[in-house]
Amino acid sequence: MADTSIGTPEQLRDPNYTPPLVKAVPLGIQHVMAMFVSNVTPAIIVCGAAGFGFGSNSPDFPQMIYMIQMSMFFAGIATLFQSIGVGPVGARLPIVQGTSFAFIPIMIPIVAGKGVDAIAVLMGGVFVGGLFHAVLGLFIGRIRFALPPLVTGLVVTMIGLALVQVGIQYAAGGVPAIGTEAYGSAINWLMAGTVIVVTLGLKFFARGMLSVSAVLVGLLAGYALAFVLGQVNLSNVGNAASFALPNPLHFGLEFSVAAIVGFCLMAFVSAVETVGDVSGITKGGAGREATDDEIRGATFADGIGTAVSGLFGALPNTSFSQNVGLIAMTGVMSRHVVTIGALFLILCGLVPKIGAVISSVPIEVLGGGVIVMFGMVVAAGISMLSDVHWNRRNMVIFAIALSLGLGLQLEPGALQHLPGTVQVLATSGILPAAVIAIVLNLLLPEELAAEATEEVSGGMSGHNRGSLGETRSH
């Protein structure tokens, strides 16, 4: 329920209303806490996939600190694009931007084991993909028909499924430890398990700020345990600078067909996700539908924010759904509250010591957090799929897209004779699944939806509401 001490019900529904600073500042920081872990985690995952060492003695370690730093800084910049706006760019709504998980299955094959040199290729894809994403703003309303819940739910589910392995690997000790005696040790799982237990406990039994920041508090609990167990190395924090500005083209820009195609295709998914978030904010916070200008401006800001991030060594940005829920919970629609949170993120991004502290979190502790986060991504996808009418047509589309997408990801060697670019795109899993689902959804005649569902293996056809055999129509 909204706190009427912040303002009248009419004021709380107004994006242009500014609450008293004594209330607005904590609300803005609350938005940052709700997204902080999810925002910096992709940078750590990408650096780990590229082969960056997590120890302070690794020559690549400062590069990881820089990417973490830029994740915070440009999440703040992209959020300002949304909340304040620049010309047609920005919805001028309380939309919080952050580093997107959706692109991780695309990024990992591009950088896998290739070191810091591969990051230039990644940034080229981020930059071009961001520009393409911005262009989608010109006609985003006209392409939504190609991405119904069947497609978007499948894609989100695939994103989560592509990431759950990373969570388990991190909890067990990280990729470099695979095959060693330390991998999967009791102490590793104790640290990861502490994060999971504390997170779930707060999420289900706490209220307000503690519930909203459950993952962050869970990570802090795991970090404290790791510190007591002597698993935390803070030596690099003292070596990190107290202040540093973003460095243009820090990693350079290199353009690869695989990276550009991958990022551009994922831009469709990210754009539709943003449309959903904008609609969720206006419905939950103001009780109205989003306008065309708001949707268009939000998509522009998404793309421009991503393109600018790529120029400075940060990863793709997108609107954060957890903050949409936070607005619905607090009832505060003020975009200026989010602006305060954005300024706090920018400040954090200017202090490398903060990035150094984040990078000191043991990989096992981070693993406990990402197991929860990635599992929630899968759950969100399944929730979206609950809106699908499971007739024969949709079952066939889902089955083929999931089987090929997930199968190619699990067995990349099956495409060893294809060109390198095609291998990178196809073995990501998410792209083949998305393309197959979109194409089949557009090509297969809707008449199939009106036919009775045939019995499938195992007697799964069913006839109850929400069953796999349901044939009801809108």
Image: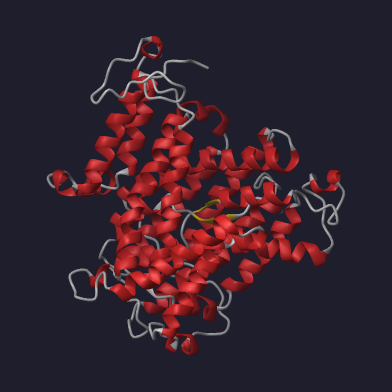
Between 474 and 303, the residue placed more toward the observer is 474
As displayed, is residue 316 above or below residue 64? above
Residue 235 image position (x, y, % from top left): 43, 89
Q: Residue furthest left?
A: 417
Q: Residue at x 33, y 49 (%)?
A: 162
- 293 on left or right of 446: right
Residue 190 image position (x, y, % from top left): 37, 72
Q: Residue furthest front?
A: 205
Residue 245 sits in quarter: bottom right
- 223 on left or right of 116: right
- 111 on left or right of 355: left
Between 92 and 233, the residue placed more toward the observer is 233
Between 277 and 352, the residue placed more toward the observer is 277
Residue 199 image position (x, y, % from top left): 50, 62
As displayed, is residue 191 above or below residue 371? below
Residue 140 sits in quarter: top right
Q: Residue at x 32, y 76 (%)?
A: 187
Residue 22 image position (x, y, % from top left): 81, 67
Q: Is residue 247 visible?
A: no
- 284 on left or right of 72: right
